[in-house]
Image: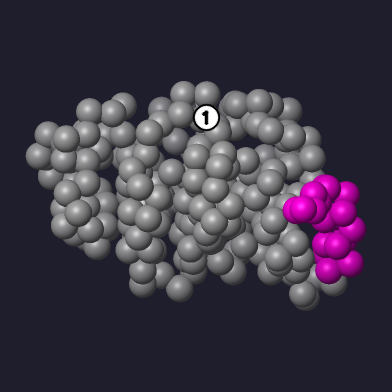
Amino acid sequence: MQQTVTTLEVEAQVQPEMEIESRRVRVGLLGGTFNPPHLGHLVIGEQVARQLGLEKVYFMPNAIPPHVDRKEAIATVDRVKMVQAAIQGNSLFELELAEVERGGVSYAYDTLLTLLQKHPDYEYYFIIGADEVAYLSTWYRVDELMRLTHFVGVNRPGVPAPKSEFSIQFVTVPDLDISSTNLRQRIAHHESVRYLVPDLVAAYIFERGLYQDDDRN
């Protein structure tokens, strides 16, 4: 039978490491469906890492997003391979498969418990867009989640930084008005996505014939 780990148990494991500053590794977590990943994702990862002095940013594809309006995504293996292609060449970026390997609905709380058990010397910075900040109160076990990670909010085009009851550190990044939804639509209509996604991602999309007849929103 699988053992259930609680927030307090993880905190007990992590706390001794956190008291030794030299042993703490500051890493960012940028999760999402990445359907497909684009230059906006990479800019966010780079800017947050540089401005906060993070040692790494882990790009973490989800298995099933816990959204009320769940978006149908393409096969997980394709999304993972596109993220691998997107982050190639940047030594700051790594791939994190915790949510894909666990499967099911990807709740951040469960993910952080797993990651902190695996890496008790890591200090995680969970990166979310300004549009997501407004919905944090609806996140699964959010009060306990706040004790496991630092939340970093980044601006989104046309979305002002909202006020929040939670402790959020905001980082300003260049406004790139690129969305995965728009990219899927452009590809389905045979429009160019050059300079909107990394070249290796574009090559993968067209080699695999992804999104060619995609009418999803």
Q: Where is residue 74 in the image (x, y as percent from the top left)?
A: 33, 43
Q: Quadrant of residue 17?
A: bottom right
Q: Quadrant of the C terminus?
A: top left
Relative to residue 147, is residue 54 drawn left or right?
left
Decide whether residue 112 is among the magenta residues: no
Q: Nearer the viewer, residue 191 or 154?
A: 191
Q: Where is residue 57 in the image (x, y as percent from the top left)?
A: 53, 61
Q: Nearer the viewer, residue 166 or 79?
A: 79
Residue of label 1: 67
Q: Quadrant of residue 128?
A: top right
Residue drawn where x is 37% and y is 52% of the image: 79
Vertical position of residue 117 compared to residue 140: above or below: below
Residue drawn where x is 51% and y is 37% of the image: 65
Q: Nearer the viewer, residue 84 or 126?
A: 84
Q: Where is residue 107 in the image (x, y as percent from the top left)?
A: 62, 41
Query: Does residue 30 appear in the picture of this structure?
Result: no
Q: Quadrant of residue 132?
A: top right
Mark 1 closeness class: few <14, some 14–19, many ≥20 residues within 10 Å:
few
Q: Where is residue 110 in the image (x, y as percent from the top left)?
A: 68, 46
Report the number of discs: 1
Main SS, magenta region, reads helix
Q: Nearer the viewer, residue 203 or 131?
A: 203
Relative to residue 152, is residue 5 drawn left or right?
right
Residue drawn where x is 78% and y is 35% of the image: 143
Residue type (three-letter) at the residue carrying disc 1:
His
The boundaries of the magenta stretch are 1-19
